[in-house]
Image (cartoon, helix red, strand yellow):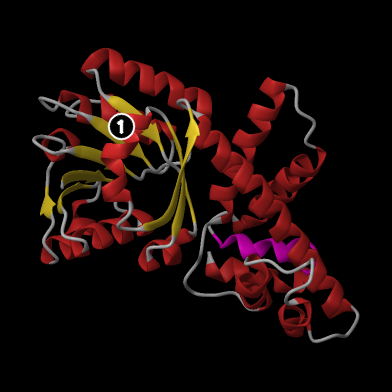
């Protein structure tokens, strides 16, 4: 397939590498052109605008920071919408379901193109290994056309329903992940305070009800801040803010998520927003604060 890809953060760059390795032709665009250089060396074609990238391709893929960036890249001057023809756009960004529905309707009105909200779970490591989980909202037929591209970096693609349901599923995912990481941070702090070697918890709890993919991954990262981060704390706060907004709209009680939101906000106020979400441990183990502040 011939594809356009806009947004070359860590996740987007890893996705493009997988697409190229799978034999797809990829036009790439990024606000900072230097980020495309390594991909050009692998066979990608660098473009000066999203419009240029989206010209004469089978479909467009986005992986951007927030809703403002998505709308600017698609509808702004020299945006994707100005390409001669656009069949479908897959958005791997995490944005509010209501905004997704608005963008999908606007794109269809202007270009008769289909918008697929397709946020992911699994992080950069999952992308590099081709094991991402993708939750998709939008037209089923458009998803069939886009699936061969996404299978370059995903192991599971689930059609959740109409436009916006992929983003809703992502908010549910983030609600569970953030709550679990809060619990892990508190458990590790409790173990430390009681004089136990907290690093032994993942082994001790393996196979039990407290086990999870997150426990062995984040325990060492919480016990010692890492130079290479896996997901910034402020990014998770953005998603939990969106989850609480949706809860308010739907009148859904979310007491636990509200507590998690305040913990994330407190950590951000301590200067940990750019640090990894593992920095949550600083709230219950303040001695960890300097190492995570240095990480940011």
Q: Is residue 230 left or right of residue 256?
A: left
Q: Residue at x 68, y 33 (%)?
A: 244
Q: Residue at x 61, y 47 (%)?
A: 174
User: Between residues 101 and 286, which one lies in front from this camera angle?
Assistant: 101
| Residue 110 in picture, x, y percent from top left | 24, 15
Q: Secondary structure at mark 1?
A: helix
| Residue 40 in picture, x, y percent from top left | 12, 60
User: Between residues 267 and 97, which one lies in front from this camera angle?
Assistant: 97
The magenta segment: 275-285
Residue 41 in the image: above or below residue 143: below
Q: Quadrant of residue 217?
A: bottom right
Residue 22 in the image: above or below residue 262: below
Q: Residue at x 16, y 60 (%)?
A: 23
| Residue 272 in picture, x, y percent from top left | 61, 58
Which residue in the protein does label 1 denote? Answer: 142
Q: Is residue 138 visible?
A: yes
């Amino acid at each position: 397939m011939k594809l356009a890809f806009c947004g070359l953060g860590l996740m987007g760059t890893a996705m493009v590498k997988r697409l190229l390795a799978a034999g797809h032709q990829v036009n790439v665009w990024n606000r900072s052109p230097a980020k495309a250089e390594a991909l050009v060396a692998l066979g990608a074609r660098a473009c000066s605008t999203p419009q240029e990238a989206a010209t004469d391709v089978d479909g467009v893929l986005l992986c951007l920071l927030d809703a403002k960036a998505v709308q600017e890249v698609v509808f702004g001057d020299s945006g994707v919408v100005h390409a001669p023809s656009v069949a479908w756009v897959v958005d791997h960004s995490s944005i509010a379901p209501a905004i997704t529905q608005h963008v999908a309707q606007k794109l269809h009105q202007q270009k008769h193109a289909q918008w697929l909200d397709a946020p992911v779970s699994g992080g950069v490591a999952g992308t590099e290994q081709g094991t991402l989980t993708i939750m998709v909202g939008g037209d089923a037929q458009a998803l069939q056309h886009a699936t061969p591209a996404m299978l370059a970096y995903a192991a599971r693609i689930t059609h959740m329903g109409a436009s916006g349901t992929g983003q809703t599923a992502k908010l549910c995912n983030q609600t569970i992940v953030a709550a679990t990481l809060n619990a892990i941070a508190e458990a590790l702090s409790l173990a430390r305070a009681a004089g136990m070697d907290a690093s032994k918890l993942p082994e001790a709890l393996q196979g039990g009800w407290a086990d999870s993919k997150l426990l062995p991954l984040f325990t060492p990262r919480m016990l010692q801040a890492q130079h290479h981060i896996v997901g910034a704390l402020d990014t998770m706060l953005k998603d939990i803010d969106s989850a609480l907004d949706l809860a308010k709209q739907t009148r859904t009680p979310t007491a636990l998520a509200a507590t998690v939101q305040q913990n994330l906000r407190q950590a951000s106020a301590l200067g940990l927003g750019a640090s990894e979400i593992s920095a949550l441990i600083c709230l219950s183990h303040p001695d960890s604060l300097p190492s995570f502040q240095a990480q940011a």
